[in-house]
Image (cartoon, rainbow, N blue to C red):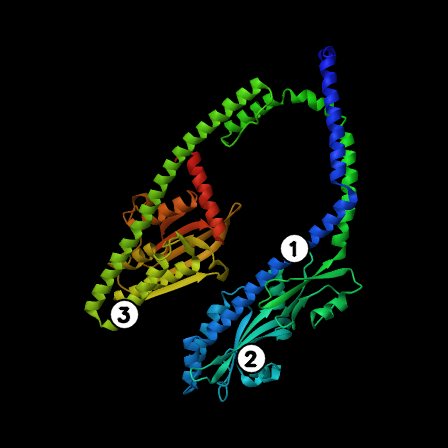
Amino acid sequence: MRKLVNYRTKLFTLMVLCFIGLNSLLLLISGLVYYGTYSRLAYREIRETKNELLDATSQKLSNYVGDIQDTARFLVTNTLVQQYLSAPPANNYDYVAKSRALYEEFQKLATVKAGLYSIELYMDWLRGYPTFQDQFMHPMADAAAQGWLKRMDRADGFWIASHEVPIFGGTISMISYVHRIIGSRGESLGIVKINIPVDKLFDMLSTGGDNYYVVLDAQGGYIASALPPGISVRGSANDLLKEVAGTKYSVIRSESNTQYWTLLQLISKDVLRQSGNEIRMLTVGLLSALIVLSIPLAFWVSKKLTSPIYGMVKGMRTLEKGDFNVRLNASSIQEYSYLTKQFNRMVCRLKELIERLNQEHRDRREAEIQLLQSQIKPHFLYNTLDLIYWRAMDHNAHEISQMVLQLSRLFRIGLSSSKWYVSVRDELAHARCYMAIQQYRQNFAIDYREETDQDLLGCLIPKIVLQPFLENAVIHGFRERSGNAAVQVRIERRTQGVARQLFITIADNGAGLPEGFEMSSAGGIGIRNVQDRIHLYCGPGYGVRMMAGEQGGTIVMLNLPLIRREEEMEQLRRSLSHEYDSAGG
């Protein structure tokens, strides 16, 4: 304190400069937040922002509607659908076969389209036959009873406004798109109806907060709405304006993307009025804050002289933790400016050297992964071609064609994608193809079974991790053993500590493991490849264990991370890459 008193002239100068700057700042802020001008600007900006958000939502809606209509056009022009509907079934067996094929064809699209509830088919096939899949195939009489069939005389495709559809335990609001199926000679073969829950539609449009919308078609007809309590509209936009008049809501309309539908939104007038209150509070708060800040300002100025040193210390500590992105701000004092410039130059050179070293480690690691990945493909390809060759010598060409079919599916699942991971569903399909080929090759029966929860089929795992162990179970496990082979694959979810893991168990009744078997001494390229890939992709905490079964045979257990989305898989890969870089490769 005595030292500060001794420098009265300099301290006085600093105080004068601070008060001049503070007064200038108060005047500037008071002018910028002037209540009347800013409130009008805020009102206009809020409304324009709402319109822009509505236009973006309308674009999303138009894209979705166009996608649904394209889906319907794809179905009605599908060669299989037209071929089956062009002629009535010859008998009950033909009816069931065609109905099942149509149902599977439609379900392929129903399962991949977001928000789609169901696809229905209306036709005259059902006369004289029992119904197949009541929620899928319907007679034309049902379409007439629902009241929309007559509209087919005016258009081949149109949307049906929101309507209640009975389901188990109640009803659900649906909107539907119907399209006529026209044969090659211009005759009407049937009608496709795509159902979309109204709730799913508006969930897709939701942007957070209260989302009240009314959807109209291109002609202004009512399609669907999600409105606040007390407001209900099933008409044109003018009807909505009349209904909303006098309430706390106002209506904005999307003026773009109206090729398919028009989107109206109700926004609360309180949102617009709130800006005025916020401006008043902001003005008062800023003035109060500036007054309060004037008290510690003198202390802050004194510390300003030592802040460059604190910045250097903080930068050095950050650098010690391994963060090479730290930079020091330039100082107005010449000596401090020179030190910060040299420090920043040193950090840049260190970062360049470490990045160069890490890049060399990453390149080497990627090369190792590519090598391991490429080993398994020709290995299995040559084995499969060998199986096809011997089967061609032993049996007729029909069975060979079936083996080739299974082989093509293997290639499509295992080799076509550039990604190193697949879903559990695709990996099981790959395994089934391989076991089907083995059924033709081996001279003994193979009982192959799978046991897994449906919600685990979408999880992501490294590709081709089952086939090497299935190959060992069938080929090596029964090389010198008689009897039928039994192979079971079980996939389940377990919790190890706080981590959720995916456990895959492969059990067989084969010859079992050799005495004294150890994973580290496994001679097969497939087993080592799977183990190495799991370590590289998922980390050293995951891998493969092999043990003898209690009643003979072999049990293989793979533990993998439970990952459901590609983003999680990429995050795991990046985290492993970061750890690898930090450890110097």
Q: Quadrant of residue 173?
A: bottom right
| In this picture, residue 238 sits left or right of residue 361 | right
Q: Quadrant of residue 77?
A: bottom left
581 and 476: which is toward the camera: 581
Q: CA distance from mark 3 to mark 1?
A: 55 Å
Q: Is residue 548 depicted above or below 101 in this figure?
A: above
Q: Is residue 140 visible?
A: yes
Question: Residue 401's mark?
Answer: 3
| In this picture, residue 185 sits left or right of residue 57 | left
| In this picture, residue 208 sits left or right of residue 180 | right
**Amino acid at the residue labelled 3:** Ser
The percent position of residue 444, horizontal first and vertical second, equals 27, 66
The percent position of residue 555, horizontal first and vertical second, equals 37, 54
**Amino acid at the residue labelled 1:** Gly
Task: Using a 10 Å C-alpha cutoff, classify the residue at mark 3 as few (fewer than 14 neighbours), some (14 to 19) or many (20 or more).
Answer: few
Query: Pointer 1: what residue?
Result: 208
Q: Earlier in the sequence, mark 2 or mark 3?
A: 2
Q: Is residue 262 depicted above or below 473 in this figure?
A: below
Q: Nearer the viewer, mark 3 or mark 1?
A: 1
Q: Are marks 1 and 2 in contact (CB under 8 Å)?
A: no
**Amino acid at the residue labelled 2:** Ala
In the picture, the quarter occupied by the C terminus is: top left
